[in-house]
Amino acid sequence: MPVGTYDAYVERLKKMKPNIYLHGKKVDRTGDFMKGGLFVIKETYDCANDPKYKDVCTATSHLTGDKINRFGNINMSKDDLLKKQLMTKLLCHRVGGCIQRCMGIDALNALAIVTYDCDQANGTKYHERFNKFLKYFQENDLVGNCAQTDVKGVRGLRPGEQPDPDQYLRIVEVKEDGIIVRGAKVCNSIAPYADEIVALPSRLMGPDEAAYAVAFSLPGDWDGIKIMALPGGHPRRKKLTAPIANVGDVESMTIFDDVFVPNDRIFMNGLEHPDVVQYAGYLALMFAHFHRHSYTGCKTAVSEVLASQAALVADVNGITKYPHVREKLSHIIGTAELVYAAGEASAYKAVKFPNGSYVPDEILTNAGRRLAGQEIYNEYAILADLAGGISASLPTEESYYDPETADLVAKYTKRNPKYTAEEAHRIFRMMENKLCDPFSGAEMVAGVHGGGSPIMETITMMSRYDLEPLKDIAKYLAGINKDIPRYERPTATPRAMLDKFKKTAKK
Amino acid sequence: MPVGTYDAYVERLKKMKPNIYLHGKKVDRTGDFMKGGLFVIKETYDCANDPKYKDVCTATSHLTGDKINRFGNINMSKDDLLKKQLMTKLLCHRVGGCIQRCMGIDALNALAIVTYDCDQANGTKYHERFNKFLKYFQENDLVGNCAQTDVKGVRGLRPGEQPDPDQYLRIVEVKEDGIIVRGAKVCNSIAPYADEIVALPSRLMGPDEAAYAVAFSLPGDWDGIKIMALPGGHPRRKKLTAPIANVGDVESMTIFDDVFVPNDRIFMNGLEHPDVVQYAGYLALMFAHFHRHSYTGCKTAVSEVLASQAALVADVNGITKYPHVREKLSHIIGTAELVYAAGEASAYKAVKFPNGSYVPDEILTNAGRRLAGQEIYNEYAILADLAGGISASLPTEESYYDPETADLVAKYTKRNPKYTAEEAHRIFRMMENKLCDPFSGAEMVAGVHGGGSPIMETITMMSRYDLEPLKDIAKYLAGINKDIPRYERPTATPRAMLDKFKKTAKK
Amino acid sequence: MPVGTYDAYVERLKKMKPNIYLHGKKVDRTGDFMKGGLFVIKETYDCANDPKYKDVCTATSHLTGDKINRFGNINMSKDDLLKKQLMTKLLCHRVGGCIQRCMGIDALNALAIVTYDCDQANGTKYHERFNKFLKYFQENDLVGNCAQTDVKGVRGLRPGEQPDPDQYLRIVEVKEDGIIVRGAKVCNSIAPYADEIVALPSRLMGPDEAAYAVAFSLPGDWDGIKIMALPGGHPRRKKLTAPIANVGDVESMTIFDDVFVPNDRIFMNGLEHPDVVQYAGYLALMFAHFHRHSYTGCKTAVSEVLASQAALVADVNGITKYPHVREKLSHIIGTAELVYAAGEASAYKAVKFPNGSYVPDEILTNAGRRLAGQEIYNEYAILADLAGGISASLPTEESYYDPETADLVAKYTKRNPKYTAEEAHRIFRMMENKLCDPFSGAEMVAGVHGGGSPIMETITMMSRYDLEPLKDIAKYLAGINKDIPRYERPTATPRAMLDKFKKTAKK
Amino acid sequence: MPVGTYDAYVERLKKMKPNIYLHGKKVDRTGDFMKGGLFVIKETYDCANDPKYKDVCTATSHLTGDKINRFGNINMSKDDLLKKQLMTKLLCHRVGGCIQRCMGIDALNALAIVTYDCDQANGTKYHERFNKFLKYFQENDLVGNCAQTDVKGVRGLRPGEQPDPDQYLRIVEVKEDGIIVRGAKVCNSIAPYADEIVALPSRLMGPDEAAYAVAFSLPGDWDGIKIMALPGGHPRRKKLTAPIANVGDVESMTIFDDVFVPNDRIFMNGLEHPDVVQYAGYLALMFAHFHRHSYTGCKTAVSEVLASQAALVADVNGITKYPHVREKLSHIIGTAELVYAAGEASAYKAVKFPNGSYVPDEILTNAGRRLAGQEIYNEYAILADLAGGISASLPTEESYYDPETADLVAKYTKRNPKYTAEEAHRIFRMMENKLCDPFSGAEMVAGVHGGGSPIMETITMMSRYDLEPLKDIAKYLAGINKDIPRYERPTATPRAMLDKFKKTAKK
């Protein structure tokens, strides 16, 4: 049954070997620290089996024709892209933020394209290998983590120039049946509870960096993979339970401590063929691109959740009618609408790639993701503004249940009579969770950096945007050129970067 | 031949009676002051006849099945909306800004819907009358001006509360064969060279404001219509001609000095039936909505033109490589992309109305138009930044041709050797036109107010956005509600405003 | 010895009766939860005794001529204001943020002025009483908390209109020897470890709200005062100790559960004389004003600390040289400079009040505080941007000491070779504290709301700014008026609000 | 009589030789094109003789002890700096913008310092020479123009690397009695009506660019100086005269077509002594610094004028009471307050230089000037927003006087009954002048670039800001350093740049 269940997933986790390092101990995947992350992943299984959501949360495998969880699907049409974006948004509503599982599928979509293109050009055999893996992934409805971000050492230096060559994941040895890799990947939000760790390069690699042009997938508990875990979540509550308080994750620095990767799990190996190295940057960018497109779904939801919470807390405070309040809500809503529209319009402009995949427009996707990243802290600022200082000085939960104080704190927490004291308490407690909490801090950081920070989107946009035909408009208006060609920017994709790389390399 | 020509248009103008008041004189439509505006309108005829553009600049009339100029077309499909947006953008590229002719067609689209809805509810006969007029309009490929913005007197007071009741256009007398109207409309950018003046209400009217619920169309030189003209344009050049210098318009305050409107030209008359008055605000908002959707096309072009000019002047200055320059260009480009995406995604979400028209999503359209309005001055600021102070202190054109100074000013105007001295001169002269010029000032003002200023878009967005289902997300997360309904905002249109109005009126 | 010591302060705390409600228990002031707050307060004693800081951290009492801690000083000169601002900034540098003790002294400064003015106008005797209290406060170098922010119930309703009349602190009974008060104050950041709780009105009160016009000071453990405590702080560390990790506070909702205030501690009682009620708003605003002026010191430090951390983490990451990094640092620094300049220039413009106090300019102070409030989230966004995603996914502290992982995580945490692995760890751990932490979340909220949110500053500015003389400039330029008076805005203070109130009341 | 008169100034202009190139003709200084500029300069003479302003508009010469016009004064105290800032603001109020005459005095102040420092280090004799010139300048109350901005050719190349070596002003020949210079300076706003053209380097020069290290002053009509004039101003009005319509300027590209400079007018000559070249950048920056400090006065006035006009037009429109209107006014006012405070606080921190001059703080001055530059277009956007679209479509002036239309346009221009129709007309005409006008366009460009664009201020700030002591705060908080030194940033001045240059040069 290719649409899997949460229970089956949990069973798999239980069987995995302990390779998670938490607070100085090596632990398995059954501890309480996993609860927050599992609460989130559960939604991705349940909704795919729920009539209310299954139309968007499932898809049809292009490999088998089976109905599968959309988190295992390769986008073979514009509709797939639109549905993926919608699914991401709807699921994020349910957990009040990141749905966490998109990294894996974005990595698989990037591999589907790049392995094919690489094989076509270089005669390698990655795509077939990848499809075999993908079939297994889909049939078992696996959870994938994408290990992309290298620790990077000194930022100004290229991988091959680092004092410590392991600051980017690399092949340290080639064997008959596989390779040995070494390095570490950070910002791996779900590595501790992923079935598979999909490793991709994080940047363009030069001809002398062939050992860094490497991609593969391995089970999360594979020998030599050491997961440095950082559980994230809201402080647990005792009596006032609520979905928001159950949400969490386990971040990870995933260390590849001389790990053997068998051949059938290798999807790129720069040492195999000199031209493969060119595909490292292409793959890195293609993943980033799909992931940024996913952001146009999740970040819309993040904004809508914030707008929803802001509207609710404004109502409890009794200030909804004030023009400045409506203007602030409208600002968050406007951002959500524009970011989502960017993702949708990117999907409508998507182009078909040789392997059959559809790739959304890269410039517009980046423009949307950038706006989201630029606005995230401001949206929290608006929430803080409308919530008021109480968010940072609410009496502790116990005060609301201690007989000596319960009535008093209830009396002084109540605001708009439309809401009971408990409802007011619930809402302000949610404000505390949202504004004064390690997890919400991490959400803000992720809002800036997840998928690439605004400066990266600017760089990507400008790398892809061809200013010459644009300048023709001005040249015509100034009277330098006699006429103006009809100017419609063609759809942009990371393919252009590969072509440019090849052209440069030739010279 | 329903796709008309510029020559036929000019012939019509020549025949019109003089009712244009310019610098204290009553003049006809043949003077030099018209040149700038005609230069722009010419493009709308020429491109509809040009193989390079005719696919977007023509459409098929739903009334006759004829191929017509798209500026006379009612949007009967999502594709119509997308093409209208694209046409607007492409034509605006050609004139470096506003294409001017959209007001008329946006007014006709609003009338097509509202007359139908009004007739259905109230048994009036406006739609048939309108269709007859529309057929005539399409067959002759007429240029329409929309006279919507009333002078408004004291802003805080409603039309019926004004000390002078004529501050909003109103019916002062009802006759057997028509009505007499009085009032004045401003910001009528092309009234002096429009075939038809289409007059619409500018706001919601109350039951005691029935005389203000009036819509009609009249030829531009109709008796009693007095056009107070304000020619706009860049200072004429003598030798260094260029398209940008040829662009202009003639703004107008259009005074209806007790004007008779014959029955067959009346499309709304609040005195005819008490319920018709409800349709005044609906019509006002429907026009604004179509016009804001047009803005997602034209304002994208305005941004792209500015980006084009900024990229060109940066290149002449030799500063393109600096990161801050690329970041600034990217900011303008990003705005263009997002605004256009908002219009596109609004069109994809469009809903079919009873008369067969398609209406794009109102919240997203407004979010896009708002971003454009909020960014316009900032985009000019970026252009000024990259152009440098020379934009405001370039020697006069004659200095470049006076033998005593020509070589010197050429020597000191040259920058990047890629560009000749004349090219540099052309580009900086364009900067002067764009930055230090009455017309560019007017373009900035229009960028804020055209179609409604950002505050109006915020108000419209929030009037239409239903916060209750949005708040359900937060209520679920806080634990107040047990579950969360699948949250997808339905397409919003001005129809909701009519329904609300009717509901309120009933009470 | 009027410059007290930390030890004496701690001795006093030990003797106080338990009236702190923490996690459902009533506790005294000796628990570990107090450590973070005490770490901060300690600096205010130590620096007053430290040759490096004593010139700014001490002052001369205008009552006794003694050298006192500046946190007990009434500002009797412009130099006092400048030194208070500087002291605030310097001490905030030392604790990486809020120094917490300013609320008390700002309250005393407001009382010094308002009690005098009230007595002069109404023949009351508050000032003498206040001075007696102040002398005691100075001599013992006490820590004061200002309890101003009422819980406020329904925001749109005035105190007298609330369904529950206790939503603003009020007098419920007048006795021979004092009054009984009821209500609750929130956002009382140091109430749990303050010697004295100074209670002030939070807004203007109307003639029918005389019972709400009340101000007084009581010891923190006084009968009937119930302190609902919320300890704030960074997660404790085991091995990697650092000042930033030691900082904390204990927020409080301070409930006055029918508390008796003896006459000699009452500094305003609206029931005593009908005109006293007018002074409630004046006092509220005067406190806000001094507190916002203090913000020009502390918020400058907050920005400088953030800039310092951003510069340091950028250096560890090896990205200092990139223009966008320097631009971002420069943005934070510019804000710090402008906010501090606003406070300084306000002090230079200060006016002497009848009691001898100096009051800084209110419009400029508010403009400075507003900028700070508008920028706070953005400054954290910049820090997050430069720090990178690692801030939200750093392995736990124990991973750096567990022999199985220590070398690996050290290897992969190191960046710029200028910094050892431990230093890099220290810096990223500080980033985690600063960005993903309940305390930093609370700091952001406080940055918006502390002393009044930006919207309050806008309202205050515009209440005080006289637009009429400003408009005279435009009237002259337009040719409406013949000449323009020399336009220099006079210093603005909350006194204008009192005068306006009195004028309005008369009518 | 060292406080001169406007009449004496005009007499001098009349006597000057024609060397102004206007619209292809060489003209003298008596034409109508000068009216706008003279209208502005007149205020600088009249106010120095007007009891209402003379306290700020005059000063005491440190050379002669005479009372002089402050536009000839060297700032020898903090009070001088404060008064100069205030004078600038007050005079700008009177002309609705730039007072134009500050460039000259800012250049003289820079020369006073740099000639002294250069002489002390290198044994040159510039300071005495300069003082002699200054005495003459003061005694005759001359108007000075500063010719600083070179045309710069290719921006990325240094002066010595340009394909055309004349793109920066340079010495082409050294003679016994003087030098011959060649080049062109732009953005010389008042060169056509200045008594003296003071030429300064525009940037740091390297050892191989000694011929570019040149400074001098010459009468405006000196042989070989060719002034390419660009008259700026609002369109002249016929009947509705108003101060705003009288304001104008004449911009200039000032060409030095092999001009002989006699020795007594040379204040820097890099060919005279190898070390003098180091002082070129120091002089360039010192002028920029004084000029940016002047901007804290004039830009405050520009904002206040805009706020004044915005408040007035909002009142005519009857929208003053709306919160968004007050918020927008408050934003402009807040910027004015902060920019002025930056200038004031810079003055209070000023340091005394060896020659006796006082130099304000450079970091804070730049922070203030930068904010002004960043906000200028936004302030116009606010004005456009509050004025409404009528600013861009007001009937022509003649329509208000033509008997056939006068009553009608008056009727439809009237708004708030507080204002007569003529007053409303005056105000909207002023809006047209301010928003849709070549001169206002130029004002916006000048608001960005005058004194250096925001990016230049960022660069200056960061060149001067020492990040190392700032980072010590973070190092202490992170536990890397044991303690934190008391952190107060010392006053920064361009002197640091000279010292750095010398240090670098030594190596």
Image: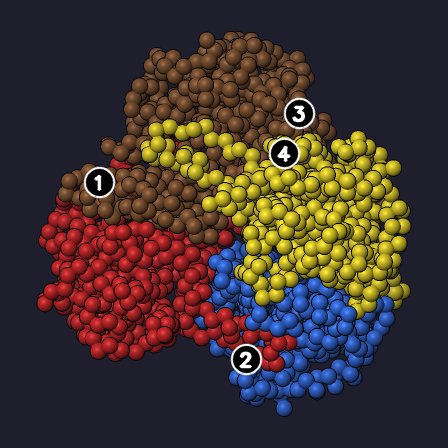
Chain colours: A blue, B red, C yellow, D brown
Q: CA distance from mark 4 to mark 1?
A: 53 Å
Q: Is residue C30 left or right of residue C505?
A: right
Q: Is residue C352 left or right of residue D483?
A: left
Q: Position of residue A51 (x, y in %)?
A: 55, 87
Q: Position of residue B373 (x, y in %)?
A: 42, 54
Q: Are marks 2 and 1 in contact (CB under 8 Å)?
A: no
| Amino acid at dot 4 | Phe
Q: Position of residue A147 (x, y in %)?
A: 69, 68
Task: Decide which of C240, B55 is in the foreground and name it.
Answer: C240
Q: CA distance from mark 3 to mark 2?
A: 67 Å
Snapshot quadrant of residue D112: top right
Mark 1 belongs to which subunit?
D
Snapshot quadrant of residue A29: bottom right
Marking on residue D351: 3
Residue ID for mark 2:
B485
Q: Residue at x 69, y 58 (%)?
A: C173
On the question of residue C474 being in view, the answer is: yes
Residue ID for mark 1:
D400
Q: Are marks 4 and 1 in contact (CB under 8 Å)?
A: no
Task: Decide which of A277, B231 is in the foreground and name it.
Answer: B231
Q: Secondary structure at mark 2?
A: loop
Q: Secondary structure at mark 1?
A: helix
Q: Residue at x 39, y 21 (%)?
A: D42
Q: CA distance from mark 2 to mark 1?
A: 61 Å
| Amino acid at dot 3 | Val
Task: Decide which of A149, C262 is in the foreground and name it.
Answer: C262
Mark 2 belongs to which subunit?
B
